[in-house]
Image (cartoon, rainbow, N blue to C red):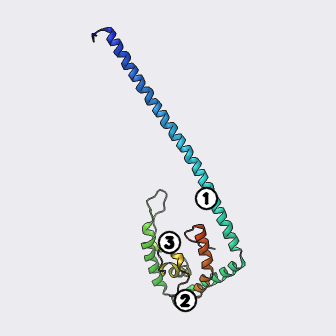
Amino acid sequence: MNIRSIKFKLIALMAISLLVMAVSIVAISLSKASTALIQSNMAVLDAVKESKKDHVVDFLTSLKLVLLSKSTDAATVETMWSLEDSFLELEDETVFDIDAIKKELIQHYNNEYLNKVNYKMKASPQRRQTQDYLPRSVSGQIAQYLYIVDNEHPVGEKYKLNINKNKMVEYSKNHIEIHSAYVKLLQNFGLYDVFFSE
């Protein structure tokens, strides 16, 4: 066949046109299939997110109910009163060197906590001076010293210390009365820690 003939040129033009059209159809189909696949996966992720959200809400609701029932128990209320009174009296104890405790707390915060925070995350607050993170009350600083700094257990297992035998103060005697019940609560619900606040 003569490549200069009109017939050959016409056939070549039709073949190229069909090839371009086929490539276009395949490209459009792939694009639409990819978009449909992404939308399908996003719908699945949305369903999972809603399901998990419901599970978290249910878990927190059940935990709230357990804590509320525990907090209204007469023995818990009485123990908490004793714990609160002895907590407030910690700053009056003469066995503590407050300046030394502050130094150890600051060192512990820097070594165990603050150096592990990613302050570069979006919307994360800037790191403050370490002493700004310390409890405002002297009693709070002493309690953190007794049960966090002066605790041989590693971070994440500090709850294992029932009583600080290095400094036998009234607070420690009251702490041990309530500690085991809340450790069981912590373990049963897979919590990191239980905090009391007013």
Residue depicted at 45% across the width and 26% down the height:
25
From the viewer's perspective, is residue 27 above or below residue 134?
Answer: above
Q: Residue furthest bottom?
A: 94
- Residue 156 is tagged as 3
Q: Percent position (x, y) of residue 75?
A: 70, 80
The dot on residue 168 is: 2
Q: Position of residue 141 (x, y in %)?
A: 52, 79
Look at the numbered disc 3 and give the secondary structure of its residue: loop
Is residue 190 visible from the viewing direction of this image?
yes
Q: Label 1's element?
A: helix
C-alpha distance separating marks 2 and 1: 40 Å
Sequence-wise, the earlier of marks 2 and 1 is 1
Q: Quadrant of residue 74?
A: bottom right
Residue 48 location, x and y as percent?
Answer: 57, 50
Q: Residues within 10 Å of mark 3 (few under 14, many from 20)?
A: few
Q: Is residue 113 left or right of residue 187?
A: left
- Front in this rendered view, residue 134 or 78: 78
Mark 1, Cα crowd under 10 Å, few <14 / some 14-19 / many 20+, is few
> Which residue was labeled with disc 1?
56
Quarter of the view holding residue 108: bottom left
Earlier-in-chain disc, 3 versus 1: 1
